[in-house]
């Protein structure tokens, strides 16, 4: 298997292995973000949904219960089930950015080790686009050992079946 394409400037990727095929791992990442993104990392209060629109140019956004929306990023690469890359609209003070010009990128690769095991690698790149002091803060946080709480939460979600959807019976 070839090495995934990686962009410049960022700490070493975070990795975790999940006991599911790559397609399941990819779908959990792009379809179930509300389940794995920690509440403290959300941009809205009382977040009701998180959506990653499929395809290049799609939005990654969250919607609060009151209808308020916050765009978390724009899809830059869409290659299911092996890769998705997006801008990451986080800025100084961990506040949302309003555009992608100063947003770093997050690149996620799903490498199937065997039919039932996938290594998920998350790289934060293009940190030079950020405010320099904030870029240093991001590097320090992302350089911590281990996969981190968010990736561990993702792994738990990926290894569980999605919740059953109920249809409105009216």
Image (tube, rainbow, N blue to C red):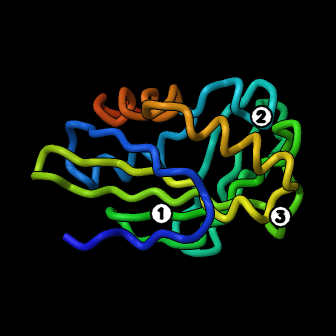
Q: How far apart, in angstroms, are the residues tagged by discs 2 and 1?
A: 24 Å
- Circle 2 residue: 64
Can you give x and y, in whole percent of width and height, for residue 23 in the image?
A: 28, 55
Q: Secondary structure at mark 1?
A: strand
Percent x, y for residue 135? Answer: 77, 50
Question: Is residue 89 found left or right of 125 in the rendered image?
Answer: right
- Let me know if residue 41 appears in the view: yes
Cα distance, mark 3 to mark 2? 24 Å
Q: Is residue 153 left or right of residue 93?
A: left
Provide residue 5's location: percent of width, then percent of height.
42, 73
Q: Specify the label residue 102 is tagged with.
A: 3
Decide: marks 3, 2 in contact (CB < 8 A)? no
Sequence-wise first label, 3 or 2 = 2
Vertical side of 154 occupied by 124: above or below:
below
Question: The C terminus is located in which quarter?
Answer: top right
Give left or right: position of 134 versus 77. right
Query: Which labelled disc corresponds to residue 84?
Result: 1
């Amino acid at each position: 298997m070839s090495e995934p394409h990686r962009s410049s400037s960022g700490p070493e990727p975070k990795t975790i292995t999940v006991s599911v095929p790559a397609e399941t791992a990819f779908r959990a990442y792009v379809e179930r973000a509300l389940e794995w993104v920690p509440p403290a990392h959300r941009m809205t209060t009382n977040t009701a949904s998180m959506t990653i629109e499929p395809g290049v140019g799609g939005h990654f956004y969250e919607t609060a219960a009151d209808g308020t929306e916050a765009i978390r990023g724009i899809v830059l690469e869409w290659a299911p089930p092996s890769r998705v890359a997006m801008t990451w609209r986080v800025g100084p003070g961990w506040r949302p950015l309003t555009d992608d010009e100063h947003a770093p990128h997050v690149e996620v690769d799903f490498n199937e080790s065997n039919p039932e095991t996938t290594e998920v690698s998350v790289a934060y790149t293009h940190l030079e686009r950020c405010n320099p002091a904030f870029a240093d803060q991001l590097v320090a946080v992302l350089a911590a050992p281990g996969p981190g709480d968010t990736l561990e939460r993702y792994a738990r979600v990926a290894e569980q079946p999605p919740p059953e959807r109920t249809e409105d019976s009216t």
